Amino acid sequence: MASLDWQLHRPAEVTLVELRVTSDCRERVALRSNLEPVWPPRRQGRPANGWQETGFEGVVTPAEPLVLGYASPAEPVDPPAELTDCEPVVTDADPAGDAAASGDTLVEKLDDDTAGRALVRALGAGKPPRGAVPKPLGHAVTAGDGPPAESAGERGDSPGRIPSDAPEDDSTLADIGRQRDGAEARSRADCPGELGEAAPTAGDHDRPVEGRTLADQLAADRLTLLELADRYEDILTVLDRTDEATAGPERGR
Amino acid sequence: MILTVTGGKGGVGKSTVAYNLATELDAVAVDADLGMADLPPGRGPDLHDVLAGRADPVEAVRDSGPVAILPCGRSLAGVRAADPTALVESVEAVAAEYGRVVVDAPAGMHCDAGLPLLVADACLIVTRPTRPALAGAVRTRELARAIDTPLAHVVLNRADESPGQRTDRVAATLGAPVSVLPDSSTLARAQRAGQPVSVVAPDSPASERFARLADTVERALT
């Protein structure tokens, strides 16, 4: 029979709960927190294996007690959690509970969705850190970023759907126009004798991003323009396809 | 049929093999290297858009070229926005529409390398006859085992052809038949041009080898 032991700390405005579940046989246990909301430990941005909104479910064995920790903004109460369910596990096969931890049968017997998430937890997300992602240039589209949502249409839309982001593109073009004017003004400013004329214009029209040189700015603009050219090509392709689809019988893939 | 081309180390030729194998198998090549895509890019929605829920996987396939391809975006923002777990249903949707899919998996052991194995019916490991590449192949073999994806074949890329202990040892260690792919400037040229070698040089030895490899893989999977 499983038994529960706990410790509580409240260093600031958050209560930290430490739980220890021991048992003399292999048991599947469910714990419900008396403190709510539960802030479970996270791995790769997702609640760690076994954690739910109100508590935890997992397997405890005589050799391996369950040691758990979570946090909650609620005031401490005694006991902070209760065992709501204990059920002896008769077989060793317990893919949902132990799979990700043991790494052996990582995804066996799980449906695809659960398996995918178990894999992300077990192996890590492999995404670049947020800080590594270049910031967009003003309101312009991010250079090198894929085509936007609208050009692809909503999931499950017909291929002939016309993108709805034309106005945004216009403003992007206007933006780039202003940036280009600014850049030209600044390059004029580089020439002796024209400084007085150009400097105020540059200040009005273009606020260069901190640390960005003129060459960088122009290179970024060039990328943005190429990206826009690509997007307009895409729109034309979609329009062509719509024409074909409305003119003739539906094409097979 | 979903075949994932993987290998642990980067630069061993996974994309080259995936692209040419897809051509020979008349399959869709899915560029699942979310962070460092290699297969030719395309216009319109790509795999980043698909995994972010902004595009339908089947509609993102470009099938106008010599090989149908679901290209991958190149931006870090795209990688961050993508939900890697959506790869499973996306690749399955493409397989349901087109029948055959070859997934080009990224290097490494993170989930972006694991999920292409999870969706696959079988995998093919590409490696080189060097110590680090073979170590990577062994680790990937273990990962495939943990995910329960069978290994159909091994390609020893840019190796000399003399049969012998080395090929046998690789086959014994990884537990699958090995094909040797010798260094080929024709193949390198084709890959640089973003074309399958069977299009650039249909009668070249490299092209014949891929036809044979496709044959072997096909027989292993049926």
Image (tube, rainbow, N blue to C red):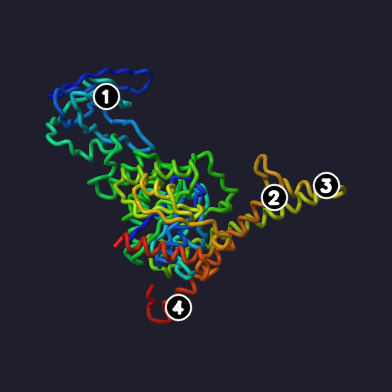
Q: Mark 1 lies on which chain?
A: A
Residue at 39 percent across and 49 percent down: it is: B168
The residue type indicated by label 4 comes to Glu
Residue at 22 percent across and 32 percent down: it is: A58
In x, y percent, where is residue B96?
Answer: 31, 64
Q: Quick check: do tags 4 and 3 share a chain?
A: yes
Closer-to-camera residue (A50/B199) = B199
In terms of image quadrants, where is residue B102? bottom left
Closer-to-camera residue (A51/A102) = A102
**First of labels 4, 3 by sequence position:** 3
Q: Indicate the secondary structure of the residue bearing disc 1.
A: strand
- Report which residue position mark 2 lands on: A205
In x, y percent, where is residue B11?
Answer: 52, 49
Q: Nearer the viewer, mark 3 or mark 1?
A: 1
- Report which residue position mark 4 lands on: A244
Label 2 and label 1: CA atoms lie apart by: 60 Å
Q: Which chain carries label 4?
A: A
Label 1 and label 4: CA atoms lie apart by: 63 Å
